[in-house]
Image: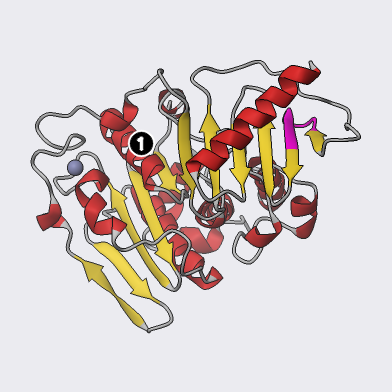
Amino acid sequence: MNKYVKQERFHGIGQLGQKRLRESRVLIVGVGALGSMSAEMLARAGIGQLTLVDGDFVEEHNLQRQLLYTELDAKAHRAKVKAASKRLQEINSEVKVTEVFHSLHNENVQQLLQGIDVIIDGTDNFETRLLINDAAYKWGIPWVYGGLSGSYGLSLPFIPNRSGPCFRCLESFLTDSEDCDTHGVLGTTVQMVTAQQVTSTLKILTGNKTQSSMYKFDLWENDTGYITVQPLKQPSCQTCGAERTYPSLRSDQSKRHIQWLCASSGVHIRPKEAQNLQLPRDPYSNHSWTYFPFADVCMLRKANYHVMLFQDGRATIRGVTTTNEAELLYDEALAFLGEQV
Ligand SMILES: [Zn+2]
């Protein structure tokens, strides 16, 4: 009996649908809570190719809701894409998994979208979602939004050739619905949002019609329903309106790129241009640098902060409360390298 027999018996998929899934390529942006669960469900469903994009590491506080990861992954500071890929291959070796150990940004998005059939949003910030949205509408690729806070969740597929609003049209409405990290999150909320995102993805890939209203629920309050989003369409939208400029795809080379990471209370810094840093490979007695050869990454621990510095000059800084603080630590880490090499 083939491993997809139950799925093939389902009226919306069938053998033809299963064949289409096997020929499909899905890009998952962010393999944290939403992204790792989506990746697992799609691997089990027999998707042909999965590309995982994430520049972060597994941490212990992820394990409550990020199902692909283990304590061992957190202890080893494994890159999420590495840990996820290994587990996905154990789950279904037929799926081709591509790891991209980098965040999505306006300079790598076009190349990463080559040949992709659907993009799944596994991010935790609006900036990246606006970038996904601009890229999806410019190159005509459907994408599936998922958002959550506490026990509350939202999901909606965006289909570029459909008449409804795009994510940019809904931005102000959605900003009020999500609150970053202050209310925490239930692991079950993640599963509920992912169930919606993956179902929408399966429908798109098998040629079925998807919902055009936004699904919303509150698991704790036993509340569920749909929000009609059609009236929120903005005719002057820069992504889906008459004059499309796709502002998130424009790149500003004149300054560092700084992005707050919602779920992990950190800051991601990308330099104006890629560097070629000589990272210290041996431990220093008076500095707490640790080198991780698998990814060419160094970690600097200082008081309650830690800085993950990549060979190309990117850094993720945790424990800070302001952008200034993050930049000072980043500069300090670079200066330290300058003294040593
Ligand atoms: Zn729009």
Left or right side of 96 for 164: left
Of residues 70 and 256, which is closer to you in this image? 256
**Left or right side of 292 for 129:** left
Determine which residue is flagged by label 1. 131
The residue that appears at 10% across and 57% down in the rendered structure is: 231
| Residue at x 39% of width, y 62% of height | 179
Q: Residues within 10 Å of mark 1 (few under 14, many from 20)?
A: many
The quadrant in which residue 140 appears is top left
Give the colour scheme shown: secondary structure
Point 17% across, 37% down: residue: 240
**Mark 1: amino acid:** Leu
**Residue 106: percent from left, percent from top:** 40, 27
- Return the residue nearer the eye: 311 or 322: 322
On-image quarter of the C terminus: top right
Place of residue 193 in the rendered image (x, y in percent of width and height, measured from the top left): 43, 63
Along the viewing direction, whichever of 230 and 178 lies nearer the viewer: 178
Question: Is residue 142 highlighted in magenta?
Answer: no
Expressed as whole percent of the image width and height from the top left, the position of residue 101 reads: 61, 34
Can the viewer see residue 51 in this picture?
Answer: no
Residue 138 seen in render? yes
Q: Which residues are magenta?
A: 292-299
Location of the N terminus by quadrant is: bottom right
